Image: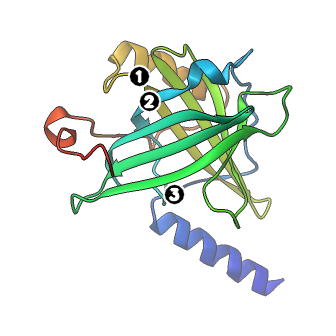
């Protein structure tokens, strides 16, 4: 039992040191977008805000979704790192249960378990509110949250409206950070990387 306690504290220390957002208790179970239509969700999305995550360190972050095959969405994530290199990762997403199409599972590495990608709200043409959560040893959970847009900016009024999607469902977004999408920084990001 003591070894499990030490392992838990070590894991929590590592995640906290890497700016991961940890909360006590199990993951919230917010409602997702009703009648989610993956075909309308395809295309390019700009990351506007996010909860810090160990796997995201850059700016100018975009996600592009494409239809791979029936029921499978291709994922292409790109970000500009501090050293001016572009980080690219590809994967795929599919609904775990076809009766809940807004609850997707995303896989980036063949031998690792998929991560949740729950679309809480989208209008398909302007914004998307995405949430993911991982339970850790039944005592804590790691939150991941994103506000995405079809354009590189969103108004403060719209952001306030989208924050409410999280907070009204018990999701703490106090640590959310802005993703720099400025033309000055992002204009030189190669399209092919």
Between discs 2 and 1, the one toward the N terminus = 2
- Label 1: which residue? 150
Q: Estimate the spatial distance between the alpha carbons at disc 2 and disc 3, rounded to whole Å.
A: 25 Å
- Label 2: which residue? 44
- Label 3: which residue? 20
Which callout, 1 or 3, points to the residue nearer the camera?
1
- In the displayed structure, would residue 71 be above or below residue 149? below
Q: For the view shown, which residue lies furthest in the left direction?
A: 184
Does 182 sit left or right of 102 as displayed?
left
Where does residue 40 sit, x and y in percent of width and height? 59, 18
Which callout, 2 or 1, points to the residue nearer the camera?
2
Circle 1 crowding by C-alpha within 10 Å: few under 14, some 14–19, many from 20? some
- Residue contact between numbered discs 2 and 3, judged by CB atoms under 8 Å: no
Which callout, 2 or 3, points to the residue nearer the camera?
2
The answer to whether residue 5 of the structure is visible from this angle is yes
Does 182 sit left or right of 141 as displayed?
left
Look at 57% across and 38% down and name the residue there.
172
- Residue contact between numbered discs 2 and 1, judged by CB atoms under 8 Å: yes
Q: Quadrant of residue 86?
A: bottom left
Q: Estimate the spatial distance between the alpha carbons at disc 1 and disc 3, rounded to whole Å.
A: 26 Å
Tell me the element at label 3: loop
């Amino acid at each position: 039992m003591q070894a499990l306690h030490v392992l838990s504290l070590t894991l929590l220390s590592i995640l906290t040191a890497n700016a991961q957002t940890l909360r006590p208790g199990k993951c919230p179970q917010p409602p997702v977008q009703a009648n989610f239509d993956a075909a309308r969700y395809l295309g390019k999305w700009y990351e506007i805000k996010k909860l810090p995550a160990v796997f995201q360190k850059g700016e100018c972050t975009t996600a592009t979704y494409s239809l791979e095959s029936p029921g499978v969405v291709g994922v292409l994530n790109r970000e500009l790192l501090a050293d001016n290199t572009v980080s690219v990762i590809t994967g795929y997403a599919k609904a775990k249960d076809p009766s809940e199409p807004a609850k997707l599972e995303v896989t980036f590495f063949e031998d690792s378990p998929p991560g949740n990608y729950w679309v809480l709200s989208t209008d398909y043409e302007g914004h998307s509110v995405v949430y993911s959560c991982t339970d850790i040893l039944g005592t804590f959970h790691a939150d991941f949250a994103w506000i995405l847009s079809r354009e590189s900016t969103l108004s403060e009024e719209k952001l306030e409206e989208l924050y409410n999607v999280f907070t009204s469902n018990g999701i703490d977004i106090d640590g959310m950070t802005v993703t720099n999408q400025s033309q000055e920084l992002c204009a030189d990001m190669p399209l092919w990387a």
